[in-house]
Amino acid sequence: RFDKVKVFLSQMEGKGVFPDVVTYNTLINAHSRQGNVAEAFELLNSMWGLGLKPGVYTYNAIVNGLCKKGDYVRARGVFDEMLGMGLSPDAATFNPLLVECCRKDDACEAENVFDEMLRYGVVPDLISFGSVIGVFSRNGLFDKALEYFGKMKGSGLVADTVIYTILIDGYCRNGNVAEALAMRNEMVEKGCFMDVVTYNTLLNGLCRGKMLGDADELFKEMVERGVFPDYYTLTTLIHGYCKDGNMSRALGLFETMTQRSLKPD
RNA sequence: ACGUUGGUGUUC
């Protein structure tokens, strides 16, 4: 609701309160995320005239916006521009670039960006590792995914719910549901909670592995633990039961879905 | 102090 923002900002200025770099970063990020990179650039350029100097957060927001639009080339251009301004990139600069390579399933470029990040002396975080582990495991390079998981632990990072979910997904995709279940046990033992995405991922693996009975049990477990099923959960299970020829169960879940006022899409 | 980045389904 940028019209309201505009009114609010002018009210602020009327009271002698002027936007600072954080205000601009917030606005630039909002436009950037919504795909309006042109407006984000305009705000970026107008900062200088107000005596405000764009910083790493400012450029990172734009790099992210361009990556989200799939404009990797232009994102690299802004990256170069920020270097030219004498700014040092950080993990939040490289992560959107990595994520975009992963979205395109470009494991090769993702690895290049990861190496580049290291050359700049930037320390990869959980997001960086999660991205590359995911792209490797989805693209026939699961050994490499596990190798990076090893590097991640070696660097002192501790796997969180998202990292475990990526690994569970990786094991399932690579035909090792047993090891995926072992990962789930490990994460719980280490005090890491399973969220709706973790459950959905494992349910999908069980369905694809024709382990519908186990999927059913896991579904019950998630509900008992107060993790509420979403669209992904129900679509995954409905698909699983359809493929398995169990239409009555599939239709039952479909009804559950409408009863929960989750409108089928 | 406040602002930027990651994971799951259907389309055989």
Image: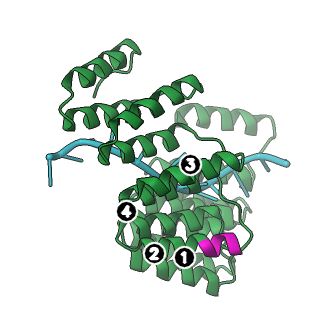
For mark 4, name the chain. Answer: A
Do badges 2 and 3 share one subunit? yes
Residue at the extreme top of the image, as rendered = A259
> Which structural element holds mark 4?
loop
Residues under labels 3 and 1: Cα distance? 19 Å
- x and y percentages locating residue A105 in the rendered image: 36, 67
Q: Residues within 10 Å of mark 3 (few under 14, many from 20)?
A: many
Q: Which residues are magenta?
A: A150-154
Among the chains pictured, the one given cyan colouring is B
For mark 1, name the chain. Answer: A
Do badges 2 and 1 share one subunit? yes
Q: Amino acid at mark 1?
A: Glu
Query: What residue is pinned by disc 3?
Result: A184
Q: Residues within 10 Å of mark 2 (few under 14, many from 20)?
A: few
A226 lies above or below A49: above
Query: What residue is pinned by disc 4?
Result: A174
- The color scheme shown is by chain
Question: Is A152 a magenta residue?
Answer: yes
For mark 3, name the chain. Answer: A
A57 lies above or below A182: below
A10 with respect to A138 (left or right): right
Do badges 3 and 1 share one subunit? yes
Q: Earlier in the sequence, mark 4 or mark 2?
A: 2
Residues under labels 2 and 3: Cα distance? 19 Å
- x and y percentages locating residue A94 in the rendered image: 57, 71
Residues under labels 4 and 1: Cα distance? 15 Å
Residues under labels 4 and 2: Cα distance? 10 Å
Q: Earlier in the sequence, mark 2 or mark 3?
A: 2
Question: Is A75 a magenta residue?
Answer: no
